Structure formats: structure tokens, C-alpha cells
Amino acid sequence: MSQALLQTRDLKLSFGAIVVADNISFSLHEGERLAVIGQNGAGKTTFINICTGLIRPHSGTVSFDGKDITGMAPRLIARRGMARSFQLPQLFLEHSVRDCVRIAAAGKAGRLGLWRSLASAVPANDVEHVLELVGMRERGDEPCESLPEGHRKLLDIAMALVLHPRLLVLDEPTSGVSTEDKHGLMETIMAALDEARITAIFVEHDVDIVAKYSTRVAAWIAGRVAADGTPEQVLNDPDIRKNVLGE
Ligand SMILES: Nc1ncnc2c1ncn2[C@@H]1O[C@H](COP(=O)(O)OP(=O)(O)OP(=O)(O)O)[C@@H](O)[C@H]1O
């Protein structure tokens, strides 16, 4: 098999007595759509935070595209091609939608400065293309604070897409979004990922969304990967149904 795009080896981390990463060795390959499932507190976000540089593990390594990135700063990891979105979108609320995407792009390029306008700091085509990908070009001039939750999620994702990642890590992209809007949101996200040929990991609690949009599922229990396989295998595993899905 080809070299893994993302690989972790023996990741360990505890917060006091709580073990949140218990020897996690995990590989992800280009083109996969991995859903990470698990009950509250299982360690899903912690895993993402370790991979994207927000938290340093006590031991173990993270490699991206064959290079060791363990403990590297998040912005440097993003520059190497792994971007992320957050469970609670990290927006610049007082700015417009378009300016948020510009700020993200300028930050990556190291072109944020008081002496130049935002609009001149990044290629307009890039910004417009990303807004188009997430279906938000018409809302480009709106202030972020007026956006409903689903659009805040999409904008947070647009701010990651403009970094041109090879891997996008999405932490609960549908949380806080109404049941009837979740599928439309995921359709938009997946179409954007397909168009830009981006590999993805998404943390998700909604089993229907997991079954429909993932090619692989990893189930977390108490800081461990308790099951890893196709959606059919993992979602029908009796242990996972009982201990993760609470059936
Ligand atoms: N900085 C921290 N300090 C102490 N404990 C923490 C910290 N971050 C997370 N935890 C604890 O670690 C455990 C795992 O948290 P994590 O956010 O990774 O879980 P999760 O699976 O993403 O849960 P959820 O589905 O609720 O988001 C939880 O018990 C959480 O309270």
C-alpha cells in the first residue's frame, strides 16, 4: 500500500487520572473519508488536537506525508497541508464573510500586516473560488455575526479550504445544526472536498451522517481505537452498538 498521508504511532496522553490517548497507532491514506465516532469524552477531539498541533502528546509520534510533525505549531502543520475546522467555528465575528477567508489566506501566506489592505494581500480568485465551493459567494459581504450556525460552520471550513490542504480535519461539522439542515450541509462539504480532491477526517455523532458520508469509521472508547473498518462493519459491530452508539 502507498505511504500513509497521516500516521500516528503509540500516542499517549493523560489529563490527571483520565487517559485520553491510550497508545493510538493509526494510519490514514489519501482519498479516505474517515468518520471518528465515540461517546462524549472518549478522546476524539484530543486526537484531532494532537494531530493538528494544538496539544503535544506525552509520548508517541505524528507523521504527515512521511515527515514527523509531532509537537509542531498548528500554523506550520497547516502550511504542510493539514487544516482543520472547529466544533465551535473560530471566526472573526466583526468582519465580513469574505474578509474572514482573506484573513485566513493572508495568515498562511504570512501577509497579514497593518500596512497593506486585506484585499491586496491575497489573490481574489482564490477567495472567490473557496466561497463558491461552499455556496457562500452571495453572502460574502455579510458580517459573520449575522450568519446562522450552518453557515458559520461552512465559513470555518472555507477558512480551512483556502489554505489548500491535502487533509481537512472537521470536528463535528454538523453539531448545532438542525436535523433537517444536516444533510444539505454535508452535501455541500463533501462536494467541496471532492472538487478540491481533499482527504478528510470528520468527528460525528449522527449515525445516519456517518453511514452516508464516510468510507471508513474508527470508533473511540476511552482513548483507544476500539474498532476500525468500513461503515457497515463498525456500525453493525455489537460491541460498538452497545458501548458507543448506546443501543
Ligand atoms: N485541557 C484539558 N484538561 C483536562 N481535561 C481535558 C482537557 N481537554 C479534554 N479533557 C478531558 O479529556 C476527555 C476527552 O475529551 P475530548 O474533548 O477529547 O473528548 P471527545 O471524545 O471529543 O468528546 P465530545 O464528543 O464531548 O466532544 C474528557 O474527559 C475531557 O473532559
Image (cartoon, helix red, strand yellow):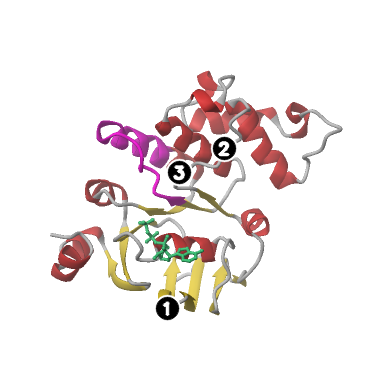
Q: CA distance from mark 2 to mark 3?
A: 21 Å
The quadrant where ligand 1 appears is bottom left
Label 2: state its secondary structure.
loop
Q: CA distance from mark 1 to mark 3?
A: 38 Å
Between circles 2 and 3, the one closer to the viewer is 2
Tell me the amino acid under the disc marked 3: Leu
Q: Magenta residues?
A: 170-191
Residue denoted by label 2: 91
Q: Position of residue 90 (x, y in %)?
A: 55, 42
Q: Is residue 3 visible?
A: no
Taking the spot 38% from the left edge, 54% from the top edge, the residue there is 203
Q: Earlier in the sequence, mark 1 or mark 2?
A: 1
CB within 8 Å, label 1 to label 2: no
Q: Is residue 175 above or below residue 73?
A: above
**Residue 126: numbered disc:** none
Q: Earlier in the sequence, mark 2 or mark 3?
A: 2
Which of the pair 95/166 is nearer the observer?
Answer: 95
Taking the spot 23% from the left edge, 63% from the top edge, the residue there is 244
Which of the pair 202/86 is nearer the observer?
Answer: 86
Label 3: state its secondary structure.
helix
Q: CA distance from mark 1 to mark 2?
A: 34 Å
**Residue 17: numbered disc:** 1
Q: Is residue 245 above or below residue 25?
A: above
Q: Earlier in the sequence, mark 1 or mark 3?
A: 1
